[in-house]
Image: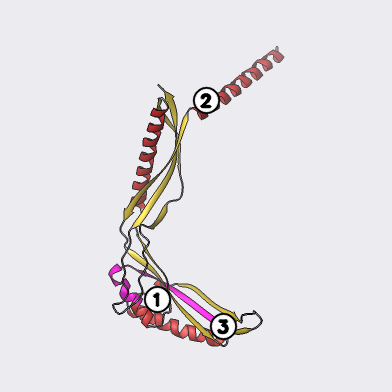
Amino acid sequence: MKHANLCVVFGLLVTMATSLHAQEIDEARSSIFVGATGEVEIPADFALLTLGVRIQDSTPTLAGRALDERMGGVIDTLLVLGFPVESLPTAWYRVTPIWDRNHARITGYDANSSVRVTVWDLATVPAVIEASLAAGATDLTGLHFGASDEREARDEALWKAVAEARRDAEMIAAAAGGVVGSLIEVSTRAPSVGPSRTLEYASVGTRGPQITPSGITVSANVTVRWAFVEN
């Protein structure tokens, strides 16, 4: 009797597993996967500058000293402009040998350093650049615009992405002779944030730097799966 009961239980388990497997296959065949992107553009409210100094000399000590002196002048200028010292982190500091053409001997040393500056008043960006160059900065390796509050834009971009995915799914379902059924799954990945236009800085001339702030585009990507229901 016990053996018979075990056979019945085993049979039920096999039947359930087969049924679940068939259900999974059926769901895979009758579902719609859609990927979509939503984008929202917002105005920039700060600029990030990377200002650098490059010096060459005969020894690493001389190169390092000259670099420190000139970079100190740039930092002092930024302090006079109202930037707190704690808001001026060093982006990098390097002293490297300069080799001859055959890479056989060292002919000097190259020292370079940079400071990262966040400018919250966009109207002052040209003046900050001009003053830094006048104080001894030799490189402006980056000027990027950003937005301090991207959360609301991210939320809106997600709404747009899901709505776009739903429209695509409905079009696909209709073309296939059915309708969109219940939601099965939805996923997203890390947001994308970048300038809506590739604008950095113009060359410095007699009128000073010509700066045009760019807008910020926040993108959200989603992948959504719905059940497909035949008419």
Label 3 sits on a secondary structure element that is strand
Q: CA distance from mark 2 to mark 1?
A: 64 Å
Amino acid beneath label 2: Asp
Amino acid beneath label 1: Val
User: Does the magenta segment cover residue 119?
Assistant: yes
Front residue of this view, candidates 15 and 131: 131
Q: Residue at x 57, y 78 (%)?
A: 96
* Residue tagged 2: 26
Up-down relation of residue 196 to residue 227 (above or below): below
For this orientation, the residue located farthest to the top is 1
Quadrant of residue 50 within the rendered picture: bottom left
- Residue range in magenta is 108-129
Label 1 sits on a secondary structure element that is helix
The percent position of residue 44, horizontal first and vertical second, equals 32, 61
User: What mark, if any, has residue 109 been given in the picture?
Assistant: 3
For this orientation, the residue located farthest to the front is 101
User: What mark, if any, has residue 85 been given in the picture?
Assistant: 1
Q: Residue at x 51, y 28 (%)?
A: 29
